[in-house]
Image (cartoon, rainbow, N blue to C red):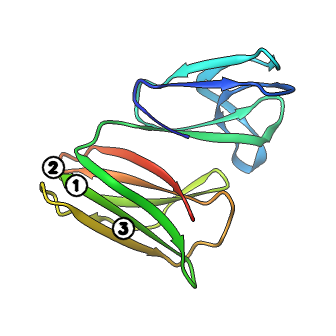
Amino acid sequence: MTVNVNDAVHWTWAQGSHSTTSGTCPGGTCTPGPGWDSGTRSAPTATFDNQFTSAGMFHYYCTVHGASMQGDVIVNAPTSATFTAFAARRLARGFSVTWKTASEIDVLGYALFRRQAHRRSQVSNLILARGDTRPASYRFADRGARANPGLRYVLQVIHANGTRTWFGAVAVR
C-alpha cells in the first residue's frame, strides 16, 4: 500500500479476529515496534485508522496470525521530481523497470529497490537524474529477480541536498 505523508490508512476486518501492529517478522518471528497497535479486534464491525506523519516504509503484521499475515505501508514525502509513469515488465531473463518524469528540480538521482516476500533490497547503484525542468525517461534491467506474485519495485529519490524520499510501488505486469 502506498500513501502520502499525513494520509491515514483505514483497515476494515472482513472476517475473523486480527490486529494491525507495526513491527518486523525476521525469520518468521514477529516483534512489535514503535508505531501503532490496533489490539485484537473481530469482524464484522472492527476498523482501525492510523495517520502516517513521516515518510518511510512501515512494516506491519497481525499478532493473531504472525508472519503468515503481514504487509508494508510506503509513505511518500513531497518530492521535487514529478513522475508521469512507473512500470515493470517481465523480460526473457529478469525484469525491466521504467519511469518517466516531467521535471526533476534539485534531484541527484534514483536508487531502485526490489520488494519481495516482505524483504526490500537495493538492485541499482545511483542512477543519475537529468535534474532540470525537462522530461526524462529511465530504464533499468533487473536480471537478478525471479518471478514471484508479490514482486514489487520502489524508487528512492535522492535529492541534491542528500535527503531521500520514496516513490511508488509497482507490480510486475
**Vertical order, 106 against 24 (above or below):** below
Q: Position of residue 90 (x, y in %)?
A: 56, 74
Q: Amino acid at mark 3?
A: Asn
Q: Position of residue 3 (x, y in %)?
A: 47, 35
Q: Is residue 132 left or right of residue 7?
A: left
**In this image, 151 relative to 44: left or right?**
left
Q: Quadrant of residue 130?
A: bottom left
Q: Amino acid at mark 1?
A: Ala
Picture layout, residue 12 above or below residue 72: above
In front: 163, or 142? 142
Residue at the spot x=39%, y=46% of the render? 166
- Classify mark 2: helix, strand or loop: loop
The residue nearer to you, when weighing 85 against 26, is 85
Q: Are marks 3 and 1 in contact (CB under 8 Å)?
A: no
Kindly identify which residue carries mark 2. Answer: 105
Q: Quadrant of the N terminus?
A: top right
Residue 126 left/right relative to 170? left
Q: How many marks?
A: 3
Neighbour tally class for label 1: few under 14, some 14-19, many 20 plus, Cα within 10 Å: some
x and y percentages locating residue 131 in the rendered image: 16, 58
Residue type, label 2? Ile
Dot 3, crowdedness within 10 Å: few (<14), some or many (≥20)?
few
- Looking at marks 3 and 2 on the same chain, the residue that comes earlier in the sequence is marked by 2
Residue at which label 3 appears: 125
| Residue 7 placement (x, y as % from top left) | 45, 25
For label 1, the residue is 102
